[in-house]
Amino acid sequence: MIKIFFRPLVITLGMGVFVSSALAEPLNSVATVDMQKLFAEYHLTKGAKAKVEADQALIGKENNEKLADIRKIADKIEALTKKLADGTIAPKAKEEFEHERKIEANKGNTLDSNRREWLNRRNKAINENIAVEMKKILDDIQVKVQAYASDNDIDMVFDKSAISASRTKLLTFSKDKFDVTGILLKSLNEGAK
């Protein structure tokens, strides 16, 4: 019972010593940055977004072409079904129409199954590319933020757009005078078209 009580106390005291020793050295400067804004307005992000949209449009076009082929088969099946509903057709012709309808239905099901697999593969590839591009862009932004902090003797830079697991902002308040988002955005987009 005593161990249960003292363990949190020892941990708390240890953290207090660590924090007080870290704060013993005064901070020269602190800054804030809106990483979401930097990411959204960075020219490389806009280029990556345009590429993704072009890829998605191409996938949509190819998917519509595949669906058009499937619709043609569905129309054939519907026409065969109407012929089968006609009570005046001969039994031999009816048998042929039923056989043809089954073949078309199998063909349509196979085409649709292949289309769905193809669509899943393409969407997965796009999502993987998006993740890779986002990581590159965020790494690039991070390097620029660190370089700016180093060049301007800034001890800490806080992301004012960061959100905790409970969906609350991590940085509750900061004065605008500490925000360097505009400066970094200008630097990031320097030389862009």
Image: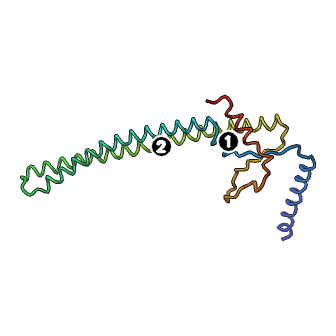
- Residue at (41, 44) in percent of width and height: 117
Q: Residues within 10 Å of mark 1 (few under 14, many from 20)?
A: many
- Looking at the picture, how far across and down is residue 192, in whole percent? 64, 30
Q: Nearer the viewer, residue 106 or 156?
A: 156
Residue 23 vs residue 111: left or right? right
Name the kind of residue labelled 1 in the image.
Leu
Q: Nearer the viewer, residue 183 or 134?
A: 183
- Looking at the picture, how far across and down is residue 131, in whole percent? 58, 41
The relative height of residue 12 versus residue 157 in the rendered view (above or below) is below
- Residue at (47, 40) in percent of width and height: 56
Q: Nearer the viewer, residue 149 or 98?
A: 149
Dividing the picture into quarters, in which one does residue 169 lie? bottom right
Helix, strand or loop status at disc 1: helix
- Name the image colouring: rainbow
Q: Identify residue for label 1.
A: 38
Residue 130 vs residue 79: left or right? right
Camera-side mark, 1 or 2:
1
- Looking at the picture, how far across and down is residue 180, in whole percent? 76, 42
Q: Residue furthest right?
A: 24
Name the kind of residue labelled 2 in the image.
Asn
Q: Nearer the viewer, residue 115 or 40?
A: 40
- Looking at the picture, how far across and down is residue 120, in whole percent? 44, 45
Helix, strand or loop status at disc 2: helix
Quick one: label 1 or label 2, which is nearer the N terminus?
Answer: 1
On residue 152, the disc is: none
On residue 123, the disc is: 2
Q: Residues within 10 Å of mark 2 (few under 14, many from 20)?
A: some
The relative height of residue 152 versus residue 86 in the rendered view (above or below) is above
Residue 98 vs residue 8: left or right? left
